[in-house]
Amino acid sequence: MKGRLSVDPLDMENASLDFGGVQRAEPLAVFHPYSAQDVAWLVKAAYESAHGFTVSARGHGHSINGQAMTTNGVVIRMSRRLGYNERPPVATKVYEKFMHVDVWGGELWIDVLRSTLKYGLAPKSWTDYLYLSVGGTLSNAGISGQAFNHGPQISNVYELDVVTGKGELLTCSKESNSELFHAVLGGLGQFGIITRARIALEPAPLMVRWIRVIYSNFSAFTHDQEYLISLHGQPNGQKFDYVEGFVNVDEGLINNWRSSFFSPRNPVKISSLNASGNGAVLYCLEITKNYGESDSNYTIDQEVYALLKKLNFIPNSIFTTDVPYVDFLDRVHKSELKLRSKGLWDVPHPWLNLFVPKSRIEDFDRGVFKGILGNKKKTNGPILIYPMNKNKWDGKTSVVTPNEDVFYLVALLMSALDNGDETQTPEYLSNQNRRILRFCADSGINVKQYLPHYTTQQEWRDHYGDKWTQFYKRKLQFDPRHILATGQHMWEDLIIKAKNAGLDAIDTYVFWNIHEPTQGNYNFEGRYDLVRFIKTVQKVVLYVHLRIGPYVSAEWNFGGFPVWLKYVPGISFRTDNEPFKVAMQKFTQKIVGMMKISGLFESQGGPIILSQIENEYETAEKKLGAAGSAYLKWAAATAVGLNTGVPWVMCKQDDAPDPIINTCNGFYSNTFLPNKPYKPIMWTEAWTGWFTQFGGAINHRPVQDLAFAVARFIQRGGSFLNYYMFHRGTNFGRTSGPFITTSYDYDAPIDEYGLLWQPKYGHLMELHRAIKMCERALVSSDPTVISLGSSQENFGEDISSLEDSSTLAAVGLLEQLNLTRDNSDYLWYITSIDISPSESFFRGGQKPTLFVQSRGHAVHVFINGQLSGSAYSTPENMRVVFNEPVNLHAGTNRIALLSIAVGLPNNGIHFETWDIGILGPVALQGLDQGHKDLSSKKWTYKVGLKGESMNLVSPNGVSSIEWMPGSLVTQDQQPLKWYKAYFDAPMGNEPLALDMKSMGKGQVWINGQSIGRYWITNANGNCGICKYSGTFRASKCQLGCGQPTQHWKSSVIRTIFSLKNKIRLR
């Protein structure tokens, strides 16, 4: 990378503002690229980042509502700074023969014009203001008075170089990568950053005859505009080259900042015209005729006269001037310099740009020009209005226009001034814009915003209409992590789907073990950014129930407690224990403090309306007696004392002390009442299904039963209902509890991949009566299967070298967690035993039997380096028993037991005291001398597997080890193998999964990130006919008996993919 990353205060300040002046967003840094490859490098870094950051491309900063800004991200400064002698990353190159020019995406149009004029050429289509970047206008459309003839700027592009949201630098055109080409044009920066554009050219005229005529009749004004643009197919001598217009609702508008066309005496004539109309609105038609040295003045006069005589303007209201072509194109900049000298340029600009269908333009005139704006004494800025031909716009691009052959641009280009006039303030002008939009909506005028600005995804869906599905698919294809152009505020997908289903609030646990993984060291980065998550919910206008706990259960590893907590001296979990209360209070205060600093409680104007302390404690309290009751009262007082200004709840806690609200969790809430009549009836967990365990069946709850339970709850006066769960999740890495599958399914309405699960989603959406069903669920199809077998390599664990290093020796059997500290699922127990050659089993007798009892979840037994057998526990019986004959030889025999723990306990009284691992007895039976107890022998312990210590899961791997090629895998059946394979990231953004049913038990990593555990064990259950009548239980409707509980390995999120991917299996 040759570019420069800057946190210079001036750079940061400039990137925090735009021309609109109504938004502010400070980035993390500003990037000055040296080349297109630099841009690709930065975006790819964002795409591949574990924590993720956003990227916004900024040209000349002429956006209006923060579209080119970003927080928690990097702004790429694409344009050169004015007044600095900086080279563009791509040099402008004019191709005279082919009539096109290649330019850098951040180049300003004024510089493009200067470069092409050296060859007597100029681009065909323009914007009114030339100090805009090429990439910026092409990302919107790029329009001016030439658009009726040549189309917008996006219709005059031959080829683009684009950096996608994946960091790919691609060349695209109508013929090559056409989907990307059309997506980017008018795509608001959502699909890629334009680094090079090939622009169509035409011979540049020398001079321009610039004409303005005045109308008092709107119908005559629009009729003449529409007539003039209908001549677009005629020879040059029979049409004008530019057609625009503007509205005059006060006396001073004709000489506005956009151009000082009229001489000082002309405004007097116009003022008199306005007066004669008794304050009526006037309309000005602005037209031009281009000509060169070879064109005589007589010819131009005749052509202009022939066109003007067919128009119906006010007689004697013709104003003309002749100017050089460059002066006409650069007309706005000259006025800009005058305003800058007076300090009137860098002011807020709450602009509103609309495309209005031709059929409703007269209604718009009556309601807006003569209505909302007609009684204003002064409108501080021009109001443009001119028609365009839809057939000059390519419908394949991302931009949307009204569905009529002719439509109008109406641009209210207002400036807010600090002059004491309330009608000139940003607030007033913004409210005026909202009034105009509301009038259009109420009148059924189907306008489309140009340079659009919305704050919710639903508004964007309405804006794009029939194009939304295509727009959304393009986003998933080219920017799946939503890295680019976040200033547009389009993407809060899962939350939007929840809102579309009629939900009003989002509930979330706070997981202590991920936010404080080691004591005193907090992690709120990336996808653990709790504040950002809540602000995202707030942006979509939903409330939040923050379930702090901090005990969460949730089938989560260790109930959400960090493992370090177990080793705090003198601690006892969830009881009247001072060390535990100190730690819990500190973490709870940390979370509440973060929310307060960000103003997120409802009492501060934020979205958090409810918080929870503790979780389902009542059963534990009864067993603990007085200590449990004392702890409960302490937890309630601690929560209330934090002064959040919102209510606190305790779920499944009938004796919750005031003012804590006790709530219900369960399949039903038809009999629940709070412990005081003045407390609201709240159902904090309406179970949509049940969790899934390895070896267990899939639990399914019919939506009819769920909907009936919810309806009955509301009928009884229920005031708050939370679905547990509404979105299925993924237990990434090693976050799941004992036997809990990586997929945290819960039969929820939105599945693990973010797809709508019907009929549950649609049925509940109808029940909520918030909106009609917005979309059908995606129709599933047969998956595309990519086999990784042919590209596999494997590495076998070296059982013979277990005691080489990093071992611990002790007499007797030690508890597993005390040694692993949850850094690995695996612990080796190693010992040896001498066998006399006189043993009778050497002479044909029965082999001795090894008996092993473990409190882990699985054990593999190795005798002298060879696998002797394995044993597994089940969700119903979590003790492992191995009792099998073993092969021994005369002399010293080494016994190696590999204990495996699939998650730590997360529920029950004092689960922190529960032991796991092999604690005995371990015995050898059937020797000539009878039973031999091995439990009290000297044992050697080794944490984890060799591959873990060598960090084989790293994408870079270990170059010194020898991986066996895939062709040899079938020849060597040694257990405990690592497998790796490379694969190309599949195109598109469809959900991806790994089919693990050919494997046994282990873990999976992709590009160094753990996807979670797998265990191909068949489901046992009762998979009979499912009837939802009667009381529901978790085992009532089960699926998948006799099949692997889970062989499709989690939702493989594309954010961890690169172009070339490495998968590792254990």
Image (cartoon, helix red, strand yellow):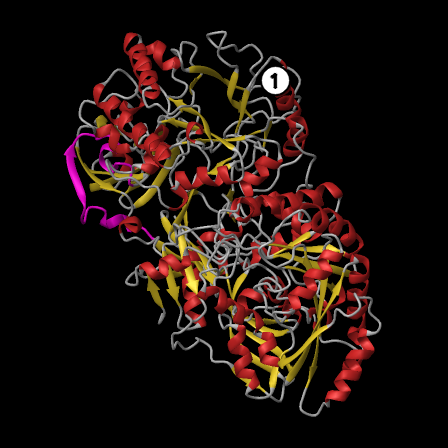
Who is closer to the viewer here, 36 or 11? 11
Image-quadrant location for residue 228 = bottom right
Q: Classify 749 as above or below 371.
A: above
Quarter holding the N terminus is bottom left
Q: Position of residue 282 (x, y in %)?
A: 72, 58
Specify start and end residues of the magenta stretch as a single range.
796-823
Q: Residue at x 29, y 24 (%)?
A: 914
Image-quadrant location for residue 889 = top left
Who is closer to the viewer here, 50 or 187? 187
The magenta stretch spans residue 808: yes
Q: Residue at x 34, y 34 (%)?
A: 885
Most distant residue in the bottom direction: 294
Q: Classify 1048 as above or below 98.
A: above
Residue 827 relative to residue 1057: left or right: left
Neighbour class for label 1 at 10 Å: few (<14), some, many (≥20)?
A: some
Residue holding disc 1: 714
Q: Amino acid at mark 1?
A: Ile
Q: Do we see residue 350 in this rendering?
A: yes
Residue 496 relative to residue 1055: left or right: right
Image-quadrant location for residue 963 = bottom left
Q: Residue at x 68, y 40 (%)?
A: 774
Q: Do we see residue 904 in this rendering?
A: no
Secondary element at tag 1: helix
Give the number of marks.
1
Q: Classify 957 as above or below 680.
A: below
Most distant residue in the right direction: 310
Q: Position of residue 39 (x, y in %)?
A: 43, 66
Who is closer to the viewer here, 297 or 1058? 297
Residue 338 relative to residue 630: left or right: right
Q: Position of residue 82 (x, y in %)?
A: 42, 71
Q: Position of residue 194 (x, y in %)?
A: 52, 67
Q: Residue at x 22, y 36 (%)?
A: 819
